[in-house]
Image (cartoon, rainbow, N blue to C red):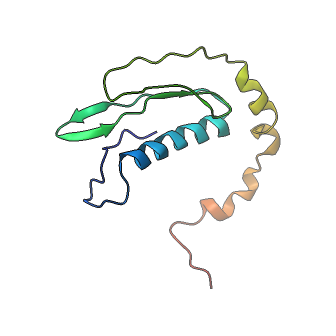
Amino acid sequence: GYNSAAYDPNGGSTEGAELRTFHSKLVVQANAYMNATWAVAVAKAGDEDGSGLIGGSCIVDPNGLIVAEASTLGDEVIVADCDLDLCQQGKSKMFDLGAHRQPGQYGPITERAGVIEPA
């Protein structure tokens, strides 16, 4: 996740605290799922240097489900029982990188930098 300010630091109004919190949790959930692992995202909350922070600490299981999360912008401790055996299914099936990864096919993405516009 992101330990972001609760407002757009560039002065815009396109993304408020609610959307920033959604994006932060979305990233944690997606990465926990894609890596078939538990994820613990620890975020500051409240005010720092005159800026409000989004908070949003959470614990996410290997399926991308939030199993515990902070509920306020105050100091909180969140806990969850993390069964490490839950990581095995994702690592042995859907995300079995040893069986499915093909580094020889990475050339087009490792040899380029920047945007290449379509012709």
Q: Residue furthest left?
A: 50
Residue 61 location (% of width, % of height)? 63, 27
Q: Residue furthest bottom?
A: 119
From what the image shows, is residue 71 above or below residue 13?
A: above
Residue 24 location (% of width, % of height)? 46, 42
Which residue appears at 54% of the width and 43% of the height? 26
Q: Quadrant of the C terminus?
A: bottom right
Which residue appears at 38% of the width and 55% of the height? 15
- Horizontal side, residue 20 vs residue 67: left or right: left
- Horizontal side, residue 17 vs residue 116: left or right: left
Camera sees residue 40: no
Give residue 93's quadrant in the image: top right
Camera-nearest residue between 49 and 21:
21
From what the image shows, is residue 23 above or below residue 78?
A: below
- Horizontal side, residue 74 vs residue 112: left or right: left
From what the image shows, is residue 117 above or below residue 51?
A: below
Residue 1 location (% of width, % of height)? 46, 39
Camera sees residue 114: yes
Camera-nearest residue between 3 and 88:
3
Give residue 72's quadrant in the image: top left
Which residue appears at 68% of the width and 32% of the height? 63
Camera-nearest residue between 57 and 108:
57
